[in-house]
Image (spheres, rainbow, N blue to C red):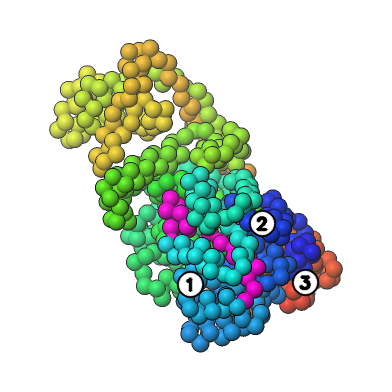
Amino acid sequence: MKRKILKQYFGYDDFREGQEVLIDSILSGRDTFGIMPTGAGKSLCFQIPALIMEGITLVVSPLISLMKDQVGALNQAGIHAAYLNSSLTTNQYYKALKLAGEGRYPIIYVAPERLLTDSFLDFALHARIAMVAVDEAHCVSQWGQDFRPSYLKITEFIERLPSRPVVSAFTASATKEVREDIVDILMLRDPAVMSTGFDRPNLYFEVQTPKNKYNTLSEYVKKHTGESGIIYCLTRKQVEEVCGNLIREGVSATRYHAGLGDEERKKNQDDFIYDRSPVMVATNAFGMGIDKSNVRYVIHYNMPKNMESYYQEAGRAGRDGEPAECILYYGGQDVVMNQFFIEHNQDNVELNDITRQLVRERDHERLKKMTFYCFTNECLRDYMLRYFGEYGGNYCGNCSNCMTQFEEVDITEMAEALTGCIREAGQRYGINVIIDTVHGANTAKIRQYRMDQSSFYGKLPGVPVYKLRQIMNDLLVDGYIRLTNDDYMIVKLTEKARDILEGKAVIMMKMAKEQEQREKKESRPKKKSSAAMQLKAEDEQLFERLRKLRTEIAREENVPPYIVFSDKSLIHMCILKPGNREEMLKVSGVGEFKYEKYGERFLEELKLGTG
Ligand code: ADP
Ligand code: MG
């Protein structure tokens, strides 16, 4: 039954990792908790049981855009589903509720704040609710990123139902505290917990430290014309700047941040989703609930505040499982800005002083781990997975570190000079002053601080500043020095530094082999950053034509293109070149319902291509 539904409605031949176990568990009547990374396919895990179980499934979801998207996709697949949220007029709302009461929809998406309203309760108490599925379940936890007080109403709602439905919960948020909160707060009963790995093998990760971020970005975006991408900036001002510049250069970009009015935000978001503006420049206000499957790159113009944010935001790339790139542009200023945000965080005003201080310390700690991600020379994927409590291999072959040649370099002499200089100056200055001193820079600041009198002044004139900075970073990561958590970020020595100062340590560091790195960068195998690049040259045109047809249909139906068919389905069509109905149904993502709607038109286009 479940396989038949998978094929008939969704057009897929096989379940992905974890899906079948979760579906079976729900069907056996057990509370179920699924933890799977973004893009892994959580929706199917509650949608398929919903179609099999006797009764209605209520899906609680935090965002209007998310509900709209998922209900749109279900309707496209020929499944009756509806949503109940504040985007409906009163009339529409009551009409939907009436149809729901008549049993028209096996799946109903509902906003958490609706659950305990009289009208909704009136419906729910008289209907047969088979399951309550809580999507984005981390929203119940204060430890999570997106705590939503209205999620706390879910439990009360369930308790008021005449008979308890199966409760299922889904999230991509991994940390232990959040998981425990979900089970406790939603009062899951002896839940089957299923967690698939967090790795997203199709994502390529890279950290760069560009001299000029904008130029680097602009070059990248132009190289990827026609592809959809998101660029995250730390501030609204930067969003405005970057987006404005891109548009001036002829890039079809749009923007999103909390400073824009509702109307414009919605319009810009739709432009992005419907591929009218394939490039989105945004603050972290953007993205929650965006299920756009064909985002081919996510660039962080600034380092975000912690790894959780980074993985979530970067994870919006490549949801269709096709290759996609996640690139972070690191700059020292990013740390300063994030420190500032942590110190001046206004979100925690209701907390008492002690708690607030704890939260702040935790935030600083998380920022530090994020910074180390930018400094590490080890496998980036491994670093991330370990952060989330998993074990990666220490070589993934699909991140900038794995693709760079490194050599072990003895940096003992440099480490001695740097730590010695810090000590002699009384641990009073920031990183730049120390580096400039050791390098022998002749600047006003150095003279003003009298660092030109230091016995370490000009001790290593031959080592370029960027290298000294790398060494400082390495000493930070390895815990020989640390930075204070205030806006000044003064370098302090740790206990561990004593070995260096006493000349008892030999310090080795992995450094990129320079020449080879440059060659490597250029000859980086055409890393299929574009989905279409997997196709043979003669099929690329076909792909473009199918894409055009998809856009046409999407416009007629008023849905985002990727809801008609994903990039993956189009690529699959180009490879398989189906000639009839039966063959078309073999294409991943082509179910019977969609075939009836669009199949012929795509077949025709394919015939033109191959005939
Ligand atoms: P999540 O909620 O876990 O982030 P979604 O449920 O939005 O992920 O699914 C992401 C994409 O994967 C969707 O485009 C979906 O159609 C696709 N997908 C889900 N299950 C399968 C499957 N078994 N085979 C192929 N594609 C799938
Ligand atoms: Mg989801």
Q: Is residue 551 above or below residue 569?
A: below
Q: Is residue 494 magenta?
A: no
Of the image marks 3 and 2, the number of the one nearer the N terminus:
2
In this picture, which residue range is highlighted in magenta? Answer: 127-148
Q: Please name the residue shown 36% across and 69% down the image.
A: 260
Give the amino acid type for the residue marked by disc 3 in the picture.
Glu
| Residue at the outermost bottom position | 91
Quote the CA–CA distance across marks 1 and 3. Answer: 38 Å
Mark sitting on residue 219: none
For residue 379, side relative to residue 482 (left or right): right
In this rendering, the label closer to the viewer, 1 or 3: 1
Q: Which corner quadrant of the image does residue 478 belong to? A: top left
Residue that numbered label 3 is attached to: 592
Q: Is residue 369 above or below residue 227?
A: above
Q: Residues within 10 Å of mark 3 (few under 14, many from 20)?
A: some
In this orientation, which residue lies closer to the viewer: 403 or 70?
A: 70
Q: Amino acid at mark 2?
A: Arg
